[in-house]
Image (cartoon, rainbow, N blue to C red):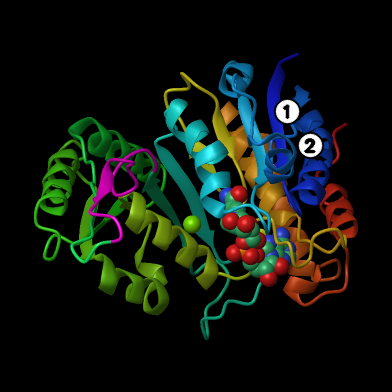
Amino acid sequence: MTTYSIAVIPGDGIGNEVVPEAQRVLEAASRIGGFSFDWTHYDWSCERFAKTGAMMPADGLQQIRHKDAIFLGAVGFPGVPDHVSLWGLLIPIRRSFHQYVNLRPVKLLAGVESPLKGREAGSIDFYVVRENNEGEYSSIGGRLYEGLEDELVMQQSIFTRRGCDRVMRYAFELAKGRKQHVTSATKSNGISHTMPYWDERFAAISKEYPGFTTDQFHIDILTAHFVRNPDWFDVVVASNLFGDILSDLGPAVVGSIGIAPGGNINPEKDYPSMFEPVHGSAPDIAGKGVANPIGQIWSGAMMLRHLGEEATAAAIEKAIEDVLARRDSLTRDLGGTAGTRELTDAIIGALPSVA
Ligand code: NAI
Ligand code: MG
């Protein structure tokens, strides 16, 4: 029997509530695929930072380097600046482990009310593929003449051929099993070096995929199309900054932040990939047992798909869809009265039984 060795980092706030619940679902579902889990728990968090001055130990990355995947809740808590939790944990993991794809599905499910009028379940179904390692989020830059009238700040964007090509190829490969349509987010009118280069690489990679349709939009009008014409898209590929924006906007147009999943993926599997919901640690509802566990559970399904357990991943997603459509065990953010545990129990109950 295959055993997957998983690093579990619940993090802060509701991460500590939704991660154990999602583990229960994954354990229950593992019998479908006939595999098992070996979970190792890490307390890396803002709470740890407050006690020890570091989000994770100095050898943290080595500790999880050989795991099959990383299952993360959320980090961030009032009192610890957000750049500390980001640059002290998430970014080192994403970059050191070459998780150069941030993947988020945008799918309107039955039972979830979209803020968009008149949209039916199934009518919105696409992926945002965000470049996750370079682009606008680089640490190259600096400040001159600090505090003076002439004060000057610079931050460099980094676009490499390798970085552009690999994330674009990932988008095309993903579209292969879908509608074979890839959209590129650009801004080559205003950003005159890096974005024309991005467009040039997109045109070059498109040529490797004859038979696929492509289009590209400037990021400003693209955000409008996400709201007005979300049915146009199949796979959308974007740089780090544009992808960050689109990958929050996409899930927002299909419903609650509590259900949206995500993955930080090293497609070559040279390093572990990390799966985490879109939402944060939600300090406003933490500790109350009311957080929606679906974003975390769905992220677990994405983790299984990455590990090659497609049937089990699909079964979990179907159980999520069934429970949402029934609407009888939903948490408050979806208009129900159930707690985190009850919603999780309903999803476990909706998994297919194995003879
Ligand atoms: P948030 O996603 O934690 O919360 C935004 C709103 O959505 C809150 O009202 C919250 O109650 C609600 N919400 C979020 N998840 C929910 C769930 N599962 N069920 C029901 N309601 C849910 O974003 P916010 O408030 O901006 O950030 C809080 C902290 O989380 C910050 O420290 C931030 O840096 C961190 N954060 C961490 C992320 C990560 O670890 N990848 C991502 C986003 C934020
Ligand atoms: Mg974001």
Q: Amino acid under label 2?
A: Ala
| Residue at 59%, 27% in the rendered image | 307
**Front residue of 282 and 51:** 51
Horizontal side, residue 189 vs residue 277: left or right? left
- The answer to whether mark 1 and mark 2 are in CB contact below 8 A is yes
Identify the image quadrant of residue 224: bottom left
On the image, the x and y values in percent for residue 316 come to 71, 45
- Which labelled disc corresponds to residue 33? 1
SS at badge 2: helix
- Mark 2, ligand 1, within 8 Å: the answer is no
| Residue at 41%, 56% in the rendered image | 244
- How far is the residue under mark 1 from the one under mark 2? 7 Å
Residue stretch rendered in magenta on the structure: 132-147
Q: Is residue 182 above or below residue 323?
A: above
Q: Is residue 183 above or below residue 52?
A: below
Q: Is residue 160 above or below residue 289?
A: above
- Which labelled disc corresponds to residue 29? 2
Q: Is residue 84 above or below residue 114?
A: above
Q: Amino acid under label 1?
A: Gly
Queried whether the magenta region covers residue 188, the answer comes back as: no
| Residue at 16%, 53% in the rendered image | 195
- Residue 231 visible, this angle: yes
